[in-house]
Image (spheres, rainbow, N blue to C red):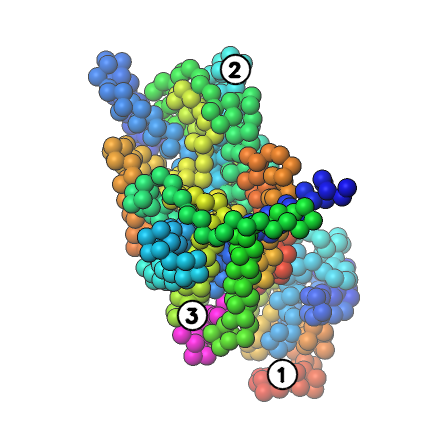
């Protein structure tokens, strides 16, 4: 019988891809923001948390089905992202990197502690949104929900790719991330483009949050911290600032994590992400898809 | 025996050949100019000499010893100092502290001595203070010793950069566009300064410059670089008349 | 030795001794409420942490945000020696600091080529890995940690703090300190002026880690219990805030930031949820309006007490 190890591995691959697609959605936000203003938006994981809660709210209070709830959450977080950028990050665009980083961490803490204050540390549960139908293919279990998640993630990523590569806005985004000043001189409204980037990144994070709520069932105000850090590692792995890199990095990280936890120690699971991080930084800091840029002397 | 000998030096960045097959020889005490249009690779040569870039091919010999593969601070130890195209002062340090950094490599006491404030710390600091102050006075910056480097006017910042480089007690000084941003009067003063420091400090000087009055005025010999290759070399009069040079500088006024 | 006895040093020494004696007197007379004593010792610990982080971030300009990792190593190693192996306190503290310094060396060397954000991320990762390692080590109690007797007194804490600050200040005020500052200001120029930047970056990391480890040892041997979850990223972040608040690059700023933050935290101890939110908001506001912190890169100096002859040496003659 081929079952046993092989089906185990395939199962882990399926799990890994589901988890990985969530990481990828979050990682995209990190990478786009870094690409455009060279800021590591530490608050990004917490935006995912807000997305999870917005989705929960839409489902349990507004009684919306999955897709409208997802959209609701994405719009809410897009607005939040733009707000944060305008209030906290814009004033620091020309400040030192350490100041910008500290501000980002400050915003993150504000969202976390504010969430704790408003929502209490008590976990909320996502009601079941999907029928519990299981599909079994060659011994590997696919939940209905898993499939929807995978499809949602990939559709969103495809939409993003299309937007960035083939629309005018996307072109403007790429221009601003190459050279902000030059883009400004070409008549691009850089402020708006930056806001737009934050909006999209936050919307994707929100989607990830809703999907996490569906996948893991419980949500709490601090749920954004670890996945946020891991998604960040994924972005670095793929090459920070590079969009396809974030997608690939996210999926890879999800896969590696699933395989490691499939082999036992789940407390070491989180360490995996950091070890990958250190490895990448030592071997090739610019990531899988990145290029080394020298300082001009 | 030339003080500095560059043989068949090449540097490629990926597919781009920044510098190819350079051959330069500089004797002790000479004042040599390195000129060429923008992007010709002049600063690249400096970066190769000082170890900021690794060479792709060729040989660099300084005081009869190979200097390829050395790190910049090691090159400085061997007696080669440089200034930069864009001023690279330590802005948040005082003028005198900027110069004291240069003396660090030669007048150093141990870290342990610093931590425990042993006698060698006090004597070392005293010596550095004296040497740095003497040097500043020579450059007319003595009264600005305690000022923040970033507060100096542009011309004085350039002078400070040169003074600082001299603090490393070099045999060969590489000046990268020292007259950039200077008006004719300042350039004239700079010319005198360059001649004077060569005498005073027994230096050999290699200088990159766009200002032709400076180059023709102080340099004994000139190398002309274009697209990474030497297209001419010789004394100023020869260079002025060289058709290849004129062509490379089309539009540039050669006085 | 004669060099040590100038007006500046004597006044500083008197100030230090006075500070110590006043508090010690209050403690011995049983007038000092325990919470105050706890806060004072905490301040000593954080002063060491803030100034040692300043050595790496402020003086040498290296972006390190995993300082809690070094502290954790110092804490655990010293605790193992004093509590599990029943060794003397001084040995435990020293060992903790040295092992932490070795970790600093290990972190410093490979991460040196990383600049700015990348270095920050690497140090963040390091801090987390250290925490996770201790979390999974049964010998030191895993997640629950373990308890140990409280051997640190005000004398120990203050004495070690004063010693640490003096040593670090001595370093910064020397040619080696200047070398580190030159790296911060312009690394390429520093290298070109003969400064072995690799050596000094590693030195800064190692020294910063040493003192952080010392602080960790003091912490462990005072607070009865150590657990991995204490040494998390939030702790690293708080130390960073202390340094930035006081002024990145200023040793006195670091002391100042440590005192202000610890006091504020103690004052707001009654309302932890609000305290955290308020801290976060204040932090963001400070970054927007005064990112250079309170002292910028300046030091509080007693130079006005200098001998007349000192002043003449600096001016023209």
Same chain for mark 1 and mark 2? The answer is no
Nearer the camera: disc 1 or disc 2: 2
Left or right of A207, for residue C264? left
Q: CA distance from mark 3 to mark 1?
A: 42 Å
Identify which residue, C79 or B153, lies in the foreground: C79
Q: Residue A3, image x and y in percent?
A: 73, 42
User: Which element is circle 3 on?
Assistant: helix
What residue did someone put label 1 on?
A: B249
Residue at image position (53%, 57%) is A148
What residue did someone put label 2 on?
A: C84
Q: Quadrant of residue C31?
A: top left
Q: Is residue B195 visible?
A: no
Residue at image position (47%, 24%) is C145
What residue did someone put label 3 on?
A: A193
First to last magenta residue range: A172-190
Report the chain holding disc 3. A
Residue at image position (33%, 56%) is A62
Residue at image position (38%, 29%) is C45
Q: Does residue A173 belong to the magenta stretch?
A: yes
Q: Quadrant of residue B231?
A: bottom right
Residues at marks 1 and 2 touching, judged by CB atoms closer than 8 Å:
no
Left or right of B63, for residue C212? left
Same chain for mark 2 and mark 3? The answer is no
């Amino acid at each position: 019988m081929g079952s046993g190890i092989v089906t185990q591995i395939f199962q882990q691959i399926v799990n890994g891809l589901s988890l990985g697609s969530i990481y990828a959605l979050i990682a995209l936000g990190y990478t786009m923001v870094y690409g455009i203003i060279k800021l590591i938006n530490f608050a990004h994981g917490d935006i995912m948390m807000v997305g999870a809660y917005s989705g929960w709210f839409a489902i349990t209070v507004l009684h919306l089905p999955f897709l409208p709830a997802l959209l609701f959450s994405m719009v809410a977080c897009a607005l939040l992202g733009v707000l944060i950028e305008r209030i906290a990050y814009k004033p620091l665009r020309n400040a030192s990197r350490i100041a910008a980083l500290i501000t980002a961490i400050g915003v993150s803490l504000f969202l976390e502690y504010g969430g704790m204050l408003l929502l209490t540390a008590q976990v909320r549960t996502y009601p079941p949104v999907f029928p519990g139908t299981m599909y079994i293919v060659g011994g590997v279990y696919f939940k209905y929900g898993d499939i929807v998640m995978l499809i949602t993630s990939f559709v969103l990523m495809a939409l993003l790719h299309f937007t960035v590569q083939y629309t005018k806005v996307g072109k403007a985004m790429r221009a601003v991330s190459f050279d902000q000043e030059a883009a400004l001189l070409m008549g691009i409204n850089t402020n708006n483009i930056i806001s737009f980037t934050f909006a999209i990144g936050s919307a994707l994070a929100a989607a990830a949050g809703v999907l996490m709520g569906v996948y893991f069932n419980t949500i709490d105000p601090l749920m954004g911290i670890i996945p946020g850090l891991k998604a960040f590692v994924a972005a670095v792995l793929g090459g920070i600032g590079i969009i396809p890199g974030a997608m690939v990095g996210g999926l890879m990280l999800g896969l590696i994590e699933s395989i490691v936890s499939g082999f036992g120690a789940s407390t070491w699971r989180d360490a995996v992400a950091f070890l990958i991080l250190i490895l990448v930084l030592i071997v090739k800091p610019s990531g899988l898809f990145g290029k080394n840029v020298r300082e001009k002397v | 025996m030339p003080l500095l000998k560059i043989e068949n030096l090449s540097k490629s960045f990926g597919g781009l050949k920044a510098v190819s097959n350079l051959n330069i020889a500089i004797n002790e005490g000479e004042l040599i100019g390195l000129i060429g249009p923008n992007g010709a690779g002049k600063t690249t040569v400096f970066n190769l000499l000082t170890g900021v870039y690794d060479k792709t091919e060729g040989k660099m010999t300084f005081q009869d010893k190979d200097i390829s593969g050395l790190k910049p601070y090691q090159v400085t130890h061997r007696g080669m100092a440089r200034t930069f195209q864009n001023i690279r002062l330590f802005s948040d340090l005082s003028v005198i502290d900027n110069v004291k950094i240069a003396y660090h490599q030669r007048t150093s006491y141990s870290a342990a001595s610093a931590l425990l404030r042993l006698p060698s710390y006090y004597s070392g600091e005293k010596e550095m203070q004296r040497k740095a102050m003497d040097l500043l006075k020579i450059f007319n910056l003595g009264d600005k010793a305690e000022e923040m480097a970033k507060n100096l006017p542009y011309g004085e910042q350039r002078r400070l950069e040169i003074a600082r480089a001299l603090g490393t007690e070099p045999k060969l000084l590489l000046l990268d566009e020292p007259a950039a941003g200077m008006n004719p009067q300042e350039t004239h003063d700079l010319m005198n300064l360059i001649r004077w420091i060569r005498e005073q400090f027994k230096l050999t000087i290699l200088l990159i410059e766009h200002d032709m009055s400076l180059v023709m005025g102080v340099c004994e010999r000139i190398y002309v670089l274009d697209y990474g290759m030497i297209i001419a070399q010789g004394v100023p009069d020869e260079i002025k008349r060289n058709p290849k040079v004129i062509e490379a500088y089309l539009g540039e006024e050669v006085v | 030795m004669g060099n040590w006895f100038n007006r500046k040093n004597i006044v500083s020494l008197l100030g230090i001794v006075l500070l110590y004696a006043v508090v010690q007197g209050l403690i011995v007379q049983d007038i000092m409420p325990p919470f105050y004593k706890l806060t004072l010792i905490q301040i000593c610990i954080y002063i060491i942490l803030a100034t040692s982080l300043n050595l790496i971030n402020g003086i040498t300009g290296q972006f390190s945000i995993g300082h809690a990792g070094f502290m954790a190593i110092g804490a655990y190693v010293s605790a193992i020696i004093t509590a599990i192996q029943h060794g003397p306190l001084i040995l435990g503290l020293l060992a903790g600091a040295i092992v932490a310094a070795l970790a600093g060396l290990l972190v410093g060397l490979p991460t040196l080529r990383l600049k700015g954000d990348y270095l920050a991320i690497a140090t963040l990762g390091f801090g987390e890995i250290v925490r996770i390692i201790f979390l999974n080590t049964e010998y030191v109690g895993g997640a629950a940690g373990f308890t140990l007797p409280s051997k640190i007194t005000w004398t120990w804490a203050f004495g070690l703090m004063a010693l640490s600050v003096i040593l670090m200040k001595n370093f910064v005020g020397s040619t080696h300190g200047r070398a580190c500052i030159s790296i911060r200001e312009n690394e390429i120029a520093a290298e070109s002026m003969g400064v072995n930047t690799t050596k000094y970056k590693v030195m800064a990391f190692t020294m910063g880690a040493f003192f952080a480890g010392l602080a960790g040892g003091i912490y462990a041997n005072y607070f009865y219990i150590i657990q991995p979850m204490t040494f998390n990223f939030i702790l690293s972040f708080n130390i960073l805030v202390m340094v930035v608040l006081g002024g990145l690059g200023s040793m006195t700023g670091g002391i100042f930031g440590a005192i202000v933050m610890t006091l504020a935290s103690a004052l707001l101890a009654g309302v932890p949820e609000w305290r955290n939110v308020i801290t976060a908001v204040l932090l963001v506001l400070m970054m927007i309006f005064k990112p250079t912190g309170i002292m910028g890169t300046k030091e509080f100096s007693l130079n006005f007490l200098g001998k007349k002859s000192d002043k003449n040496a600096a001016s023209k003659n």
